[in-house]
Amino acid sequence: MSRRGGVSLLWIGLAMAAAMWMTACSDSSQDDPVGDQRLVYRHALDGAPRSLDPAQASNVYAKILAVNLYDTLYRYKYLARPYQLTPNLAEGMPQVSADGLIYTIRIKPGALFIDDPSFPGGKGRAVAASDFVYSIKRHFDPETRAQGAWLWQERIVGLDQWQKDGADYDQEVPGLRALDDRTLQIQLISPFPQLAHTLAQGFSAVVPREAVEHYGREFAINPVGSGPYRLERFNSSGAVLEKNERFRQHPLSLEAEGYDPASQARLGLNALDGRVPPFMDRIEVPFIAEDAARWNAFIAGEVDFIKAPVTQFDRILASRNPPTLSEELSQRYNLAANLESGFVHTDFNMDDPAIGYHPDPDQASRNKALRCAIVNAFDWDQRNEVFYYGIGRAFSGIIPPTAPEFDAAQSRLAPQRDIAGARKLLREAGWNPRNTPVLEYGFPSSVTERQMFEQFRSFMADIGYPPDKVRPLTFATYGDYARAYLNREVMLTTTGWTMDYPDAENTMQLFYGANASPGSNSANYVNPEFDRLYRASATMPPSPMRTSIYRSMNRIVMEDCATISGISRTLILLWNRELAMLPDRSFVGGFFFRFVAPGVGESSLRGESSD
Amino acid sequence: MGTRRTWAHLKGDRAGLVGLLIVLFFLGVAATVWLGWLGQGWSEASGGRWLTPNADHWFGTNLLGQDIFARSVYSVRTAFEIGLVVALVSTALGAGIGALAGWYADSWIDGSVMWLKGVLDAIPFYLFVAAIAYALQGQWWAMHLAMIATFWTTTARLVRAEAMKLRSHDYVRAAQAMGLTDMRIIWRHVLPNTVHILLVQATIAFVAAIKTEVILSFLGIGVQDGVSWGLMLAESTQEVLAGHFANFIAASAMLFLLVLGFNLLSDAMQDALDPRGGGA
Amino acid sequence: MTASALDIRHLSVDLGSGKERRTVVDSVSFELRRGEVLALVGESGCGKSKTAEAIMGLLPPGRSRVRAERIRLGEHELKDLPSRAMRKFRGRDISMVFQEPRAALDPVFRVGQQVSSVFRRHRGHSGSKARTASAEMLLRVGFAEPGRVMRAYPHELSGGMCQRIGIAMAMACRPQVLIADEPTSALDVTTQAQVLAQLIRSCRQEETAVLLITHDLGVVAQYSQRALVMRQGKLVEEASVADLFTRPHNEYTRSLLTMAQAGMA
Amino acid sequence: MREVMRPLARKLFQALLLVVGVTLISFLLMVWFGPDQTYTLIGKNATTEQIAEVRHQLGYDDPFLLRYGEYLLELVTLDLGVSNASGESVRTLLARTVPISLVLMIPGFVLGNGVGIALGLASAHRRGRRSDRLITALSVTGMSISFLVVLIAFQVLFSTPYGLDLFPVRGWRVSGWTSYLHYVTVPTLALLFVTFGYNTRFYRALFIEEIGRDHIRAARALGASESVILWKHVLKNSMVPIITRIMFSIPLVVISGSLLIESYFGIPGIGQATFEAITSGDQPVLKAVVGLTAVAFVAIQFLTELLCRRLDPRLG
């Protein structure tokens, strides 16, 4: 043969390199050296927190980490459903004055912040009531870029004024005081029955002033708390938590946590009664946003817990109603099907004269007919089927099924689609394909959002709405989308709302006139009757009467067709059977890693050399 | 090198002919979409979800029950619209700027053009495109503009070099001597002599445009309304992991074929139009 | 032992492939005797250089085809020789000097490295030995200070110097045959004569036969014993130089001569 | 001395102009008209005053020149501020992410160019013959496949039960050589697949030009073996364009290339950080990435020129 020599050598080299590559890869998986005797729990999240500063714990991922790294005064009982508050760092439930305005809270002794260079001598000091005062004040300090201020805005005496006066921490707020090291007193402007709930929020977690001042903006990635765990490592791909050895000793009482042996026996929690949490030495929290990757990591045994992706429901579920685990998977995993405490809804921008309020009453009523026709055309069954595997729970109204005030009778289980009714509404109001307005449906650009839009367009096509009059209004970032709808520039806004506490007040305020954009009333809905009822109910403690007011308000919003609502998703949570736990992240209060424990056959939770 | 010779050369190039046929085929498909004969039901949810290919849905259906065949065919039109707009405008822009820079080589015009080119080349492409897409929030032409803004530089560089060469040619000097204005000479004598560059560059820009569209649509800053292979691929990234391949195969196969066709055509044209008359 | 250094019978060269194939050398036969200087004359594009490249085996295999009944170098048949075997002869037994002296040297290596590489390759010389041999060789082609030349890069030298280096490299192994392809036409007139004289002198010393490709009939007259005239790929005349100038047989040769005279006049 | 300094000064001045241009354009696009993070930082039920306060804190209400000036100052002092999104200092962020991107991209980049050079050499060397035609056909095919398609296909092929199921679907949990190879393989193969067409084609054309030169023919005529010709003469003479190509693609590969790979495979490198900065409008990060890339680009241009001068005596 002819000229070749030079090149063949290279091929040999490449082949050898490839061979080495393959051998190196063959012993793939088990090389993370966690091979000690310590108990490790790996909890996959489907998103990442943006910050570990409790003041910025606005998303569910941040909240989960916040309540494990920090302490809150209250929390929800581990096992009780529906949710019940229970003291956490507080010694007992707050003592409330007869007029409902003064709350006095004692905190437990012995709580310590973790050791950190920001403390004198590096030793963590005891948590004091003044730390709590400081932590709430931070939300009102513009420097913090806190996101929880709305919980207490115009509620606590002097707090808003303190902000106006320049947020000087040395200046006292009359309504927020530490009476001594262990006693806290909050004075309200008017009754706020949900106050204790707000103190179970990640937002209200207790942070030490020393650390905040020491780290400045980087406090967000250097959490210094008194929670059951401390942070070992954190970046955009995950967090690693280590047990806080100095966390206060407080045995777990199943009874106090609302244990229901009938339904919860299968969880294997019995053995935990009386033992002292936290039970696991190390918590690994990988953030895996992509569904398939999260699922594969779970199946491969790389994580112990996931929120199952809808795309895998076919393989996971043996039945839909109630959701049960397939035979194959039930050997290894436990399942919890939790209805989320929140809902997804699409609001009309009532400020837009093409679809909402109009100075001309005739036009206004035609607009209302149009809105109602669109509401009627929306096919919740389809939406549920395609995007939520048919196990979501559609309801009509703004009181989601997990709210204590939910009324199954009022909100038909699934709002019925009514094509004929919708067409009739359009016809009677004089709408036809030529004179209907162009609908601009806003969404931040993502595949699912786009598919939801396309589905919406096909629903509209069914009532004769021309497809080229249903247009996408896309936004590159969620922030830009938020800016647009908070500035009332989006005609149809789809948002999800996760309840901050189990009280429908939290969803009612979404339609309260004073909360119109840039507040959370993104429909810019203003109805005097609704607003009057809202104000009347706001200071009322839970009662059948308040519930009935909520229901009237619900009816008002639905009759005005201000929103296409809604659906609560069913979250399918799966975890390793070898763990004794009841995961729940459907509620924003957060999930406590401290109660996760090794079950009977705990072998795989330890490193490889378990003996 | 006359047109005839070029054509003869092209005819002798089997790969080039295949490329031309593929491109013409897709152009035909795009035309049927423009005329409203094919792909019109791309947004209708007309079937069950994730149907396998059958008589009603040749390529099956997607999550929403939309017909994948209609969507992939409609995407041909999207691809041609993006490709043509970007290729034409960026080539024209590159030709104009390049000719000016070359004609006035070493002047401030040339200097600023070269500076701008250097600047654009120094910004990472996707970052730049993303930035334009964000700055022009929601405009359907943001993506086009971003591509045009980066694609013209190569054409300009080549045309500039050619224009500098032509400047010293006798017939150009003669035209100057006859008192023609610079602009007129550039238009009449310089630009026509860069056609071989422009044709090839236009095909290259076309290919680059439809390939870039795919990436941008995946990143969520591409096609906003309508459907494109990029959007289909973006949909498919989750589906393939659950074992639904129809979206992926349809979009990637058609994308591949069209790009391959254009690449083959572009290569053949490069050979055929090479003023040095060279072979492969 | 035959008297011929190079014996060519019916050598043809086709270029291109498929429909575009064309024959550029058409059944050329000639013989180069030992120690002789044989001129190959013809206008540019007549196939002179392709003939030389075909003999050297330098035509690219994918895009050309060489057919011959015989290409003998001394006792060795070069026809259809695998390229690896052919390589052994090139530079050792048959060598070549090119038209563009500077382009024929690799611009990124120093002259010394390039000359030494020939000794290393064919003589198996070690580094220092090859350098000594190179210096000696350069001395022989007329460089007074070989050390300085060896440290230089080609672009730092004049065309004439580069061609001397080319000659030194070609003659390094005392080849039987040297093909000189228009060795001086790229040089200016004064250097031309010196370089050519140097080339012929070196060949005489080593008893190397030269195939001198040129279009310059003056050169033919001055240095060669015999001449071949080539036109459109075919040999049209073969004669001693004396005969060529006095009794040209072929019409084309005559026209060449007239043109040359007109040019000289 | 002045003879040497003048072109150098000129080069420096041009480099400076380039940096000004890049920073100005990127500032204009990414910062001035760029994404607005205010609305992801405010809490629920924020008032207009609170929104204005956040805007003010983010510096969105400062005048153009002030903001641009601050940007330049940040680049000069390398005081890059803290990420708006996470509070992490941008320098920590870069120190954390850039090494990951480097070790992620280097194998594919090196192999991609290596394979491109090898195939280009082979192809140029056997030009016109069957193996050349095969390589050319393969590179056109390679050039015709979208990067995204390759990523999806390779993920299915190598990392799912529908294919070989050998490698992790995504992520980057690297703690040693084995896990490194485990995670880097699929991205590397994808990168290799996508770039080999372009590389091979580029190098083939380059080598064909070099092989056609007279001195190659001369070397052959003097009996140089083909490997000497290819590896010594052709390669060394091609070094300037090779180095230029490689050097110039470094900043773009590290940012643009890894942007797609990292966001697809969920690898916490600078590409993903940039992508996240884009989608969340985290301007301090964006500013740093673009500004430093521009500076790196200009620096590399400078370095390349120096390197080329060393490699090619004619330029020196």
Image (cartoon, rainbow, N blue to C red):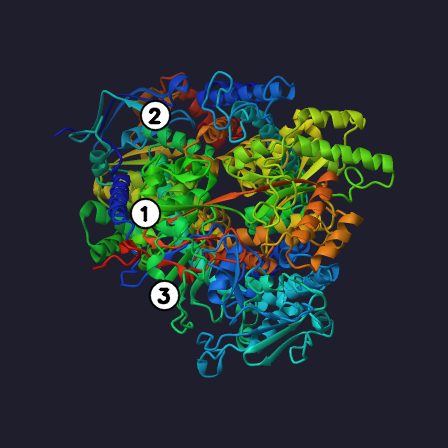
Disc 3 to disc 1, C-alpha distance: 78 Å
How many numbered markers are drawn? 3
Viewer-nearest residue: B144 or A158: A158
Secondary structure beneath label 2: strand
Disc 2 to disc 3, C-alpha distance: 92 Å
Q: Chain of mark 1?
A: D
Q: In the image, what residue type sits under mark 1?
A: Lys
Q: In the image, what residue type sits under mark 3?
A: Gly
Q: Chain of mark 3?
A: A
Q: Residues within 10 Å of mark 1 (few under 14, many from 20)?
A: few
Above/below status of B161 relative to D29 = above
Q: Are marks 2 and 3 on the same chain?
A: no
Q: Residues within 10 Å of mark 2 (few under 14, many from 20)?
A: some
Q: Which residue is mark 2?
A: C64
Give x and y (percent) for residue C151: 34, 58
Q: Which residue is mark 1?
A: D232
Looking at the rendered image, the disc whose residue lies closer to the viewer, 2 or 1, is 1
Give x and y (percent) for residue B262: 52, 28
Taking the image as shown, residue A280 lies to the left or right of residue A524, namely left
Viewer-nearest residue: D270 or D174: D174
Q: Chain of mark 2?
A: C
Q: Which residue is mark 3?
A: A274
Q: In the image, what residue type sits under mark 2?
A: Ser
Q: Which mark is residue A533?
A: none
